[in-house]
Image (spheres, rainbow, N blue to C red):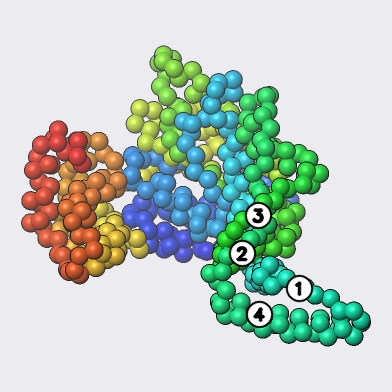
Amino acid sequence: MKDLTPKEVVAELDRYIVGQESAKKSVAIAMRNRWRRQQLSDEMREEIVPNNIILIGTTGVGKTEIARRLANLANAPFIKVEASKFTEVGYVGRDVESIIRDLMDISVSIVERKKEGEVALEAEDLANERLLDILFPGNGSGDSHEGKSDLAERQKRTREKLRVKLLDGKFEDRVVEVDVADETMPMMQVFGPIGLEEMGMNLQDIFGSSIPKKRSRRRTTVSEARRILAVEEASKLIDHEEVLRDAKSRIENSGIVFLDEIDKIVGNSSGTGPDVSREGVQRDILPIVEGSNVITKYGIVKTDHVLFIAAGAFHVSKPSDMIPELQGRFPIRVEMDTLTTDDFIQILTHPKTALIKQYAALLETEGVKLKFTKSAVRAVAEIATEVNDATENIGARRLHTVMTTLLEDILFEKSGEEPEKISITKEMVNSKLREIVKDHDLSRYIL
């Protein structure tokens, strides 16, 4: 985990997310506390639990983006799940423990990629040696020891010359046949307690190396064969036991679960309709958030120190409608600010991957240089605010619909033509969008 200070975390988040200072501050403190915990003695470290956070706000204000960017900063295993996808045990649907199983899969992938990067050069060297064996297999034999020695010496010199040519890219387009492991293994259908079928159990996991992996021959170019063989060689060089230990440690000490739409499992107190399992889902989530042992195909994972960031609009319900035990496990509550016209202007222009920069980059591939005047940017922001106020408020996502409608003709017509510069003005924005905005039915349909 990078040892960023809270101020540095907020500064990094500011590059991508506009406003929401209180939310950024809360997650920055939570992230720094995880680093602080790692510096403590084993006894004290076990006692300190993460302060889980609930982000409260309408859709499109940046809840998911904050959690995603935070995970990137921490280089931590991160998973986004929707609480509404899970059901109480006994109902058909996903088991809440699958969150941790999926997170473990992600963590293993992260560590494997890191380890593969560390051995990439060695793996490529080994792949090149295998390619030389495939391209120019050694042949011939001598009748005497002296003859064998001369032959071996000649083959060695020839191999060195061929290695130089191979490394210079002289054989890249030549077609070769390579033996590759077939990763598809027969799945075993498991009939048992809910969730067991999600553990990804297959015959190879259960019986290990007692079932030899099936191999098949593939015809491919040398360049593609090198990539395939390098992956195989990297896998041989990696200590997979160490990968699992590292992945498990990453989850247990720095894993982040973003639990979206948590308000959907709170519901109201009417007790009518098909919502009988909502409180049950809360009770199933509770042990995971409190800290429990979850069985995965890689072993048992403890969730005591996984950071949970929940988010919801809470239009119908409120956080206090959650069961008291779950409320207690989310002590930090942050209300997200509603986005204003000025925020929309910032979102369109300020972030590193701002929306206007994205469209400009897309059109630049066609030789079109797109530029927005300041008044045009404000006009787009004002229209997005107006439509959000008049219809459903979907936050910054409204900018996507407005921008796509505004640039529709340009995106359609400018394909492979002569390079040109296009300047979007306030007048162009108003002429294209104002009529749609005035007609509420039309704006609801289009924007």
Given residues 437 and 174, the one toward you in this image is 174
Q: Earlier in the sequence, mark 1 or mark 4?
A: 1
Q: Earlier in the sequence, mark 2 or mark 4?
A: 4
Q: Is residue 189 above or below residue 376?
A: above
Proximity of marks 3 and 2: CB atoms separated by less than 8 Å: no
Give the structural element (helix, strand or loop) at label 3: strand
The numbered disc on residue 217 is 3
Residue 157 in view, yes or no: yes
Q: Amino acid at mark 4?
A: Leu
Q: Name the residue carrying label 4.
A: 162
Looking at the image, residue 57 sits to the left or right of residue 84; the answer is left
Mark whose residue sits in front, 1 or 4: 1
- Distance CA(mark 1)–CA(mark 4): 12 Å
Give the structural element (helix, strand or loop) at label 4: helix
Q: Residue 354, percent across and down?
A: 31, 59
Q: Name the residue carrying label 2.
A: 176
For the C terminus, give its image quadrant.
top left
The numbered disc on residue 138 is 1
